[in-house]
Every structure is written in structure tokens, then in C-alpha cells.
Image (spheres, grey):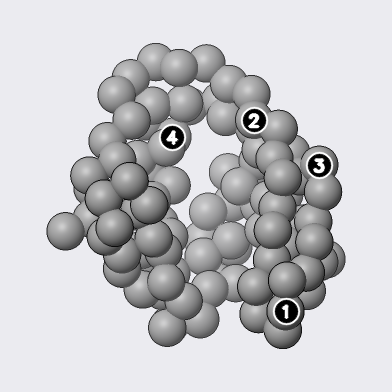
Amino acid sequence: MSEPEIQTYYNCFNERRFRDAAALFTSDAVVLHVPFGQHERGARAYLRFTETWIRAFPDAILLPQQIKSRGESLWDVDLRASGTHLGALELGLFG
């Protein structure tokens, strides 16, 4: 993934084009739920993750403030998030 693709990913999220964003994930891409150490792989895992976030924050907007490469396939992204919190954010979704 490149910096422009990362920006495209966040644009897709903000425009609620979740299937377009999911298409950026390879089948072996890990979607990790850090608080519980749980993970799934691929586009389906990403779509489940976004469903959880959008239930809790239906108008969430994620704006990358800085994108830094940490190697060939690892990136740090500093985000500014805004949105209305309307429901529980179920962090234990993946099992």
C-alpha cells in the first residue's frame, strides 16, 4: 500500500464507500482488535469492523494528519476523528 492508497482508504470511509475501501484489503490482511488481541483477515473483517464503528459513530469522519512509512508494508497514520457518539462501541466483536 502507498500513501495515496491510504488517503483513498480514508476518503472511502468518510464517503461511506465501505466496499471500495474493503477492496483495498488483501485476503491475508489482518484486522486487529487491539484491546482484546483478536483478529480476522481480509475485506470481510474490515466490513465487520466498519459496521461496528458506524453503529456507534454514524457520522464519523477520519482525517489523516500525518502518514509515515515504517517499512515496506507498515505505516503510521495520525488521525483526527470527529463524529457524534450515539451507541456502544463493541470492541469485542471478533472472536
Q: Nearer the viewer, residue 42 or 74?
A: 74
Say which of marks 1 and 4 sits in front. Answer: 1
Q: CA distance from mark 4 to mark 3?
A: 21 Å
Q: Indicate which disc, 1 or 4, sits on the residue closer to the N terminus.
A: 4
Q: Is residue 72 left or right of residue 90?
A: right
Which of the image's four quarters has the C terminus? Answer: bottom left
Look at 70% across and 53% down and name the residue there: 77
Relative vertical location of residue 22 with respect to residue 90 in this rendering, above or below: below
- 4 and 3 marks in contact (CB < 8 Å): no
Residue annotated with mark 4: 54
Relative to 41, say whether 52 is above or below: above
Residue contact at pointers 1 and 4, CB within 8 angstroms: no
Circle 4: residue type: Ile
Q: Amino acid at mark 1?
A: Gly
Coordinates of residue 11 in the picture (x, y in percent): 72, 49
Q: Between disc 3 and disc 2, whose residue precedes?
A: 3
Residue labelled with disc 2? 81
Q: Secondary structure at mark 3?
A: strand
**Quadrant of the image occupied by residue 61:** top right
Task: Compare marks 2 and 4 and give the one earlier in the sequence.
Answer: 4
